[in-house]
Image (cartoon, grey):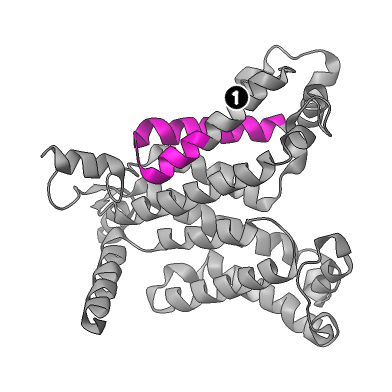
Amino acid sequence: METAKQLYRYWFGFGSPVTMGVFRIVFSLLLFINFAMIGMFWNDWFGQTGYVPAEIAGRWLDSHYLNGGTADLWFNRIDPLFGVSNDTVVKVVYWMTAGFAMLSALGLWSRFSTFCLAVGVVTLHHRNPIILHGGDTWMRVASIYLALAPSGAAVSLDRWIALRRGKAPAQPELVSMWPQRLIAYNLALLYFTTTWSKWFGGLWKSGDATWYPARLHEFDRFPVPDFVNQYPMVKVTTWGTLAVEFALGTLVFFKPLRKWVLLSGIALHMWIEYSMNIPLFAFLMTSSYIVFYDGEETAAWWDRLKARFARSQ
C-alpha cells in the first residue's frame, strides 16, 4: 500500500516548476531554429511547386484519401491545412507557428503560446510528412506535453510580469508533476522501444549495424577516422549504442546512475551530431534530458553555480 502511495505521489504530487521552465526555453528555441532553417527553403518543402504539394501530402498520409473519403480526415487528426493548396495561407501558418515558438521560449502568454505551438507543429508535420526524422517525431510529442504543462510558472516573462505587479510569490508556487513525468517516461520509452526494435534486427544483434550509415555519404558531415568505421570498432559502436539506449530507457530512473547514463547519452548524440548531418536531432534529444531532474534539483544546481561564480569574482 505504501508503495502505491509513493508511486502516486511521484506521478501526481506537486513540485517546483523550474525544470519545466528551463525545458520550455531550450526546447522552444530549438523549434524556432528548426523553423528558421527550413524556412530558408520554404517553397521546396511546403510550396505547391515544391517537392510535396498538398495532394501528395494527403496521399502519403492516408490511403483512405485514394478512395475519395477525405471528409473525415481533419477530424481524425489535427490537420487544419488538409487539402489547402494556397501557398499564402500555408506560409502564414508556418511563420505564425515559428512566432509562437519564440513566445513560448520567452514564456509570454505561456498557456496560449504553447498550445498554439503544439497545434502548429502537428499541423505542419501533417502538411509535409516526408521531411520528418526521429527528432521531428519527438518534437511533435514533446510540444503536446509542453502545452499541457504549467511551463510558464517559472523562468518566464509571465512570472516576471506577475512579480512586478505583486501578483506572484517570491518563490514559484508548486505545480503538478504529471506533465513532466509524461515527458520523461515518453523519452525513456522512445529509447527502450528503439533498443527493442534494433535487438530483433539481425544487423544490430550481430554487431554490424553501424557499418552501413558510414556508407551513406549524403549524411557525411565532419571527417571521421577510418578505424571507427572498420572492424572491430564497428562491433563496439553497434553494441555500445544498444547498451546506451537501453540504459536511457531503464537505468536513467535509478538516481545513483542517472548522471552517468545521461552523460553517455549526450556523448552518443554528440558523436552522431559530429559525424552525420541530421539537423538538430542530437540537440532536440539531449535538451530533453533535464526532465529527469526535479525542479528542486535544477534550482539547487543553479544556486551552486551562482555561488561558485560569486566566489571567483
Residues 192 and 219: in front is 219
Name the residue at 61% across, 62% down. Answer: 282
Q: Which is the main secondary structure of the residues drawn in magenta?
A: helix
Quarter-of-image position of residue 202: bottom right
Residue numbers of the magenta segment: 99-127
Q: How far across and how far down the image is residue 210, in percent?
A: 80, 72
Name the quadrant containing residue 108. top left
Q: In this view, does 164 lie to the left or right of 50?
A: left
Q: Is residue 81 visible?
A: no
Q: Disc 1 designates what residue?
A: 92
Any part of residue 139 in sight: yes
Would you say 213 lies left or right of 79 here?
Answer: right
Mark 1 closeness class: few <14, some 14–19, many ≥20 residues within 10 Å: few
Q: Position of residue 51 (x, y in %)?
A: 84, 34
**Is 72 placed above or below 122 here?**
above
Between 146 and 195, the residue placed more toward the observer is: 146
